[in-house]
Image: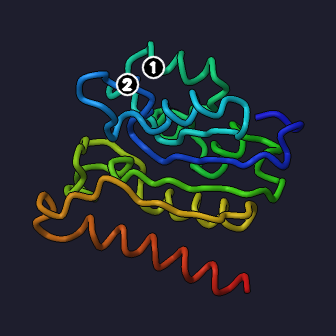
């Protein structure tokens, strides 16, 4: 993320997947194509950050493609094994970009959390971002950035027998509305 893009919009995606698969001409768009479509349609119009990406869930081809288009990718492994807390690790990766207040969209794909915490994700994995780390990151980002939109994706209630995933999504929304009320 370059300092010259100070007022460019910022998109931050919390996700296990990059979601940069090309659109399949036969099947059309899918949950794996939104950021491919965005980066193809609007190159150099925004800064893009992926947080919590799992190496086991993404091809090296897609990772290279995203980075070649300016995406900043913070792998889950970086967050889990760096020795620093998640907030410190994210600030190290993003640097001064977090200090500028600019229009920001936060996208939270619920599969960024482990299957133990969010079993009702359309895809889930044994490892994932810790809930406490996410909320610390979320609070830091909403304090430093001008968050205009929040989306929560891939919650699958039919897979969520204990409703813990739905409740986690509700807590994220509640925290966002609490932070918005506090800022007014």
- Mark 2, residue position: 58
| Secondary structure under the numbered disc 2 in the rendered image | loop
- From the image, which quarter does the C terminus lie in? bottom right
How many C-alpha atoms fall within 10 Å of the one at disc 1: few (<14), some, or many (≥20)?
some
x and y percent of residue 67 in the render?
60, 22
Q: Which quadrant of the structure image shows residue 180?
A: bottom right
Where is mark 1, residue-wise? 62
Cα gap from disc 1 to disc 2, whole angstroms: 7 Å
Residue at the outermost right position: 4
Q: Nearer the viewer, residue 93 or 155?
A: 155
Residue at point 52%, 46% (across, down) = 13
- Horizontal and vertical percent for residue 145? 73, 60
The quarter of the image holding the N terminus is top right
**Residue 114 in the image, given as x and y percentages of width and height:** 30, 49
| Residue beneath the point at 49% across and 30% down | 36
Q: Left or right: where does residue 139 sit relative to residue 115?
A: right
Q: Give the residue drawn at x 55%, y 24%.
A: 66
Other-residue count near label 2 (Cα within 10 Å), few / some / many at <14 / 14–19 / ≥20: some
């Amino acid at each position: 993320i370059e300092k010259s893009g100070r007022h460019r919009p910022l998109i931050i995606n919390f996700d296990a997947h990059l979601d940069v698969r090309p659109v399949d001409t036969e099947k059309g768009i899918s949950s794996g194509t939104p950021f491919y479509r965005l980066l193809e349609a609007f190159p150099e119009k925004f800064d893009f950050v992926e947080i919590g990406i799992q190496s086991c869930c993404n091809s090296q081809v897609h990772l290279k493609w995203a980075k070649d288009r300016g995406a900043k990718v913070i792998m889950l492994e970086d967050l889990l094994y760096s020795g620093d807390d998640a907030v410190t690790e994210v600030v190290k990766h993003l640097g001064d970009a977090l200090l500028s207040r600019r229009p920001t969209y936060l996208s939270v794909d619920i599969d960024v959390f482990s299957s133990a915490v969010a079993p009702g994700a359309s895809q889930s994995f044994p490892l994932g971002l810790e809930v406490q780390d996410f909320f610390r990151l979320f609070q830091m980002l909403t304090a430093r950035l001008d968050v205009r939109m929040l989306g929560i994706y891939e919650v699958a209630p039919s897979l969520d027998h204990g409703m813990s995933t739905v409740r986690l999504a509700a807590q994220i929304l509640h925290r966002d509305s609490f932070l918005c009320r506090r800022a007014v």
